[in-house]
């Protein structure tokens, strides 16, 4: 019997649905007309405007500061977590696993509000610091599970062999573990970086005045109706993200996303 | 005696210290910044608000009483309904798409998969904004629909529940496709041919052989869409109107507009309960049908037994 065409057509429809807004937005970023009911000619003026906007630059700087610090901290803590989760099978690790897994399934808004309540209770002033702490918290889990995925096919006898040959832990970590687990850790770090750059809801709850990241800034631009440069900004933003994703695919082959 | 105790403590330490030391950073971090804050959501709901928008002293049941007001059950119900419709539509689209992806030759699969996932990597707010551009009253969709006479010129595609649904489905569709695909990839497609050889129609084979085999994938997809959809805030806020508000919007309003943290906390506790419930159900279902489902099915009754290749 001839195979059904339904799956193919559905997939094509899904792809059209997924790319429709992206295409519209990209076209729109070069359209001289504001809302794109019609095409009024090609222009770079939205991009030019974008580069003149200083608040966007400060938001970009905040985003990078948060993403880089969060990636550094969460990659170290998350990789360690993956290692102990893989290495030990104790009751402590069962609890550890549960606590590491839970942030992946809790909706963002609950994480945002609970951290806000936590900060308010302790009278901590909201700012970039509170944003970084929040981002590290959700990134640890993602890094841990990406690295844990890599560890599934890690052969522990490599470590034992190195020990038999007289290597200390320092040498084992730098000469055996990091080279073997490096790609997994790098994939985890890239995921942490993209998630941090991408996050809106949690940041919105825990960001103080002056610590807006790019997504929070885009939100306030939409809310205040100054939307002319958002298309251009989005296209640039998207290009960078796509580049990072495609590059990270080369580090985590066979394992697209999470 | 003391030396024996000391030696025992030392031996325990030597055995567990490395594990404790290595576990401490992540476990303590998550206890401090995730577990304790999550518990706070339930306790702050019983605190009074203070005039400065912080949390007052003492305990009260006021918030609980205010949550009984009729407007809240309505919003809670809408949140549930919108999330369920989103989940259903995502599943209906994800099953054929996941099936198609799993049947692609291995060499092509990696990139087709990336194609499906890529839009998901664009910034969440950018995606919402893109939909605002698409659905805008002066945008190309509305102008062309009006020209074609399908839509009247004063109808609005934006700021209603329909827009919220479209953007929710758009946002969570990849989360449904991935687990369905992952389950379909492990499925032996020859079983479908076998079922048809034994007289099943193509549709019967699909429903009775394929769908039961990807059960776990369907369950994961349901959770991956339903739970975050319950907590949506930005989407109904930016493309919805006052009549399509969800619990997330109410939480944000209590935090940012009236600065009543205990009230926001009470609403969040309700939302948390709504999230925990489907997870418990899923855990029960999963423990009843562990991974060995397809194997048992092969040994099972005559109907499924016929599906053996």
Image (spheres, rainbow, N blue to C red):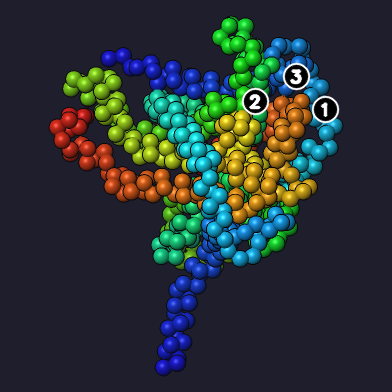
Q: Nearer the viewer, mark 3 or mark 1?
A: 3
Q: Are marks 1 and 2 on the same chain?
A: no
Which residue reaches farthest top?
Answer: B148
Coordinates of residue A47 in the picture (x, y in percent)? 79, 26
Q: Nearer the viewer, residue A163 or A12?
A: A12
- Say which label, 3 or 1, has the lower sequence index: 3
Dot 3 lies on which element? loop
Q: Is residue A186 visible?
A: no
Check if mark 2's residue and mark 3's residue have beta carbons within 8 Å.
no
- Direction from residue B106 to residue B199 in the image, left or right: left
Which residue reaches farthest bottom?
Answer: B1
Mark on residue B132? Answer: 2
Q: CA distance from mark 1 to mark 2?
A: 21 Å
Q: CA distance from mark 2 to mark 3?
A: 13 Å
Q: Which residue is mark 3?
A: A34
- Direction from residue A131 to residue B108 in the image, left or right: left
Q: CA distance from mark 3 to mark 1?
A: 14 Å
- Tag 3, which chain? A
Circle 3 residues within 10 Å: few <14, some 14–19, many ≥20? some
Q: Nearer the viewer, residue B125 or B117?
A: B125
Dot 1 lies on which element? helix
B199 relative to B9, above or below: above
């Amino acid at each position: 019997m001839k195979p059904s065409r339904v799956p193919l057509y559905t997939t094509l429809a899904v792809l059209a649905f997924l790319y429709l807004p992206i295409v519209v937005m990209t076209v729109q970023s070069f359209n001289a007309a504001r809302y794109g009911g019609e095409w009024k000619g090609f222009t770079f003026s939205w991009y030019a405007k974008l580069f003149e906007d200083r608040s966007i630059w400060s938001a970009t700087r905040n985003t990078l500061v948060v993403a880089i610090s969060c990636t550094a901290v969460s990659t170290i803590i998350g990789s360690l977590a993956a290692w102990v989760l893989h290495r030990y099978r104790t009751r402590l690790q069962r609890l550890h696993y549960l606590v590491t897994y839970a942030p992946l399934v809790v909706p963002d808004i609950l994480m945002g509000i609970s951290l806000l309540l936590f900060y308010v209770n302790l009278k901590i002033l909201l700012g970039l610091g509170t944003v970084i702490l929040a981002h590290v918290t959700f990134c640890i889990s993602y890094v841990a599970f990406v690295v844990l995925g890599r560890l599934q096919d890690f052969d522990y006898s490599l470590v034992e062999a190195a020990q038999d040959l007289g290597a200390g832990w320092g040498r084992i970590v730098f000469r055996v573990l990091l080279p073997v687990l490096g790609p997994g850790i790098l994939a985890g770090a890239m995921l942490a970086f993209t998630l941090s750059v991408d996050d809106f809801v949690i940041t919105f709850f825990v960001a103080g005045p002056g610590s807006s990241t790019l997504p929070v800034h885009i939100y306030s631009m939409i809310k205040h109706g100054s939307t002319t440069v958002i298309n251009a900004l989005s296209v640039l933003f998207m290009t960078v993200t796509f580049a990072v994703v495609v590059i990270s695919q080369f580090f985590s082959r066979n394992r697209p996303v999470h | 005696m003391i030396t024996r105790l000391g030696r025992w403590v030392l031996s325990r330490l030597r055995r567990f210290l490395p594990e404790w030391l290595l576990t401490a950073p992540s476990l303590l971090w998550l206890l401090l910044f995730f577990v304790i804050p999550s518990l706070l959501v339930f306790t702050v709901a019983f605190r009074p608000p203070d005039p400065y928008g912080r949390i007052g002293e003492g305990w009260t049941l006021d918030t609980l009483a205010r949550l009984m007001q009729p407007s809240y059950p309505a919003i809670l119900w809408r949140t549930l309904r919108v999330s369920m419709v989103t989940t259903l539509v995502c599943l209906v689209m994800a099953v054929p798409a996941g099936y198609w992806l799993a049947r692609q030759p291995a060499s092509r699969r990696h990139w087709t998969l990336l194609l499906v996932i890529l839009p998901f990597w664009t910034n969440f707010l950018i995606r919402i904004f893109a939909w605002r551009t698409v659905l805008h009253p002066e945008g190309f969709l509305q102008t062309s629909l009006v020209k074609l006479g399908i839509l009247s010129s004063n109808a609005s595609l934006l700021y209603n529940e329909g827009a919220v649904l479209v953007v929710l489905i758009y946002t969570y569709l990849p989360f449904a496709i991935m687990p369905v695909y992952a389950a379909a990839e492990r499925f032996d497609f020859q079983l479908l041919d076998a079922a048809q050889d034994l007289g099943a129609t193509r549709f019967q084979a699909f429903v009775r052989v394929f769908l039961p085999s990807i059960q776990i994938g369907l369950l994961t997809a349901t959770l991956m869409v339903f739970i975050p959809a319950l907590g949506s805030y930005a989407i109904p806020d930016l493309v919805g109107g006052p009549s399509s508000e969800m619990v997330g919007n109410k939480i944000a309003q209590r935090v940012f507009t009236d600065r009543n943290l205990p009230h926001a906390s009470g609403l969040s506790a309700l939302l948390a309960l709504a999230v925990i419930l489907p997870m418990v159900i899923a855990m029960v279902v999963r423990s009843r049908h562990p991974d060995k489902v397809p194997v048992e099915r092969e040994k099972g009754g005559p109907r499924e037994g016929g599906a053996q290749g």
